[in-house]
Image (cartoon, grey):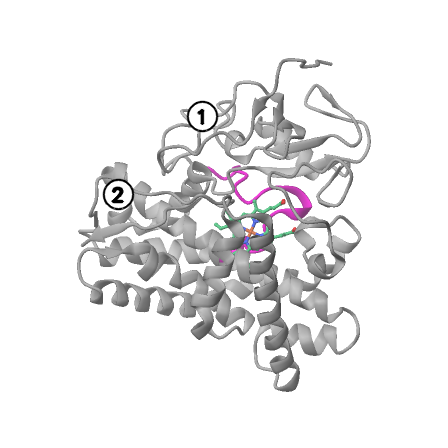
Amino acid sequence: MTTTEATPKSFPPPPPAGPRPNPAPEAAIERVLLPTGTQAWLVTRHDDVRQLLRSPDFSADFTAPGFPVLRRVPPPDPKRSAGLFIRMDAPDHTFFRRMLTSEFMIKNMRTLEPLIRQTVVGALDSLTAAGQPADLVEHFALPVPSMVICHLLGVPYADHAFFQNRSRTLLAWSTPPEEAQAAADDLRAYLERLIDVKVAEPGDDLVSRLATERLATGEITRDELVGLSLLLLIAGHETTANMIGLSALVLLQHPEQLRELRDDPALIDDTVEELLRYLTIVRQGLPRVAVRDTVVGDHEIKAGEGVIALLSAANFDAEVFAAAEEFDLHRGSHSHVAFGFGVHQCLGQPLARSELRIALAELTQRLPDLALAVDPSEVEYRDAVIYGVRRLPVTW
Ligand code: HEM
């Protein structure tokens, strides 16, 4: 067993100046000081991160004593946290997750692919119609996943400016807690009205199915349906949008690999996996708290101590990924943890993969002369829980 008594480093570190995460910390496990003034263990090795994320000795419930929060949050409120199963443990987590598993299965996502392709092609048309230079985020990276998740959930895309704005506010580090809560409340009120419409006139969409098959039967409450819809709406567009923007930037910065991908479209699956690893957009890691005394790697963690599974460090672990700092689409990065690991591993990953493959394949094939319209040093990055670029001015 080892113990570390050194003065803790601050976490998270300042954002990097480019698309790739900061270099991985050297220590396998070290004590860090969070912006809220509390301390937590930062877990960085690939093996340890996977062990901790699949262990029942850790809780994902942010109301559990000792849970490591990176931002000050208002006191827990059952109405506001209903249905948000990403922050629940079994059996509640299992109950909600099971309700949605079949909806997000790979085979269902495959049937969605023609619609994704159509959406991608339409967004590329709107990008080229905007005239050069145009912002790839505004015309392509953000609309594609927003339209797809709207279609799946039955949310009118016409309302995209509203929900994109509130999601951005909610996820930005700089948003004061009260403002973040107001943004979440606005989204909740919007979804409550939407659910009333679905109850009265169900359509062929996920929110309607949940309203008729689970809400009407009393299996879930209205607040829980609001929470489920909120989680899916936010997770469904913000993450993939940030991945598409950053991926385009990384490919443009690696012109030889971009050319290879253009010449051999079959490389798209490996390219997407390597981009997921190399970018690890959930950069601040995944917080958990130990619910009993336990061991991670060779390190003892006491009940009530917070831990952060640093996905970006695990994805750059030299024991698993040789020359991890390099972007290499031939790597075959299938053991990355960009979608997390264990029971909370991303529910939307089949959807995210389909969207990324189609979006990046069409972008590279249809705009072979795509280029950055600014110097890479001028690209601005998002100050948010999920890393991304604010704008990406391009020509073609
Ligand atoms: C490239 C895009 C994406 C990335 C990198 C990503 C990443 C992640 C990660 C790291 C987690 C684990 C959180 C934890 O353990 O605390 C997660 C969970 C989740 N993601 Fe994603 N995600 C992406 C896209 C999506 C999409 C498109 C959806 C769509 C609906 C989605 C829905 C969810 C949900 C519902 C959870 C919670 C699962 C649970 O707690 O059981 N994600 N995601």
Q: Is residue 28 above or below residue 265?
A: above
Dot placed on the residue nearer the N-terminal end, 2 or 1: 1
Quarter holding residue 131: bottom left
Look at the image and give the residue range highlighted in magenta: 333-351
Q: Which percent across, then down, holds residue 104?
A: 58, 61
Q: Is residue 200 above or below residue 284?
A: below
Q: Are marks 2 and 1 in contact (CB under 8 Å)?
A: no
Kindly identify the amino acid type of the residue bearing the numbered disc 2: Leu
Secondary element at image label 1 = loop
Number of numbered discs visible in the structure rendering: 2
Task: Between residue 198 and residue 115, name the one nearer to us.
Answer: 198
Q: Is residue 336 magenta?
A: yes
Q: Which residue is mark 2?
A: 252
Camera sees residue 369: yes
Camera sees residue 267: no
CB of mark 1 near ligand 1 (< 8 Å): no
Measuring 41% from the left and 69% from the top, which residue is drawn there? 114
Q: Which residue is mark 1?
A: 23
Q: Which percent across, then down, holds residue 210?
A: 67, 72
Measuring 43% from the left and 58% from the top, which residue is drawn there? 355
The quadrant of the image that shows the N terminus is: top right
Count neighbours of disc 1 (C-alpha within 10 A) and say few if under 14, some if 14 to 19, many if 20 or more: few
Secondary element at image label 2 = helix
Q: Is residue 374 above or below residue 189?
A: above
Q: Which percent across, then down, holds residue 306?
A: 70, 32
Q: Is residue 206 above or below residue 52?
A: below
Task: Between residue 318 and residue 396, name the one nearer to us.
Answer: 396
Count neighbours of disc 2 (C-alpha within 10 A) and say few if under 14, some if 14 to 19, many if 20 or more: some
Q: Is residue 15 magenta?
A: no
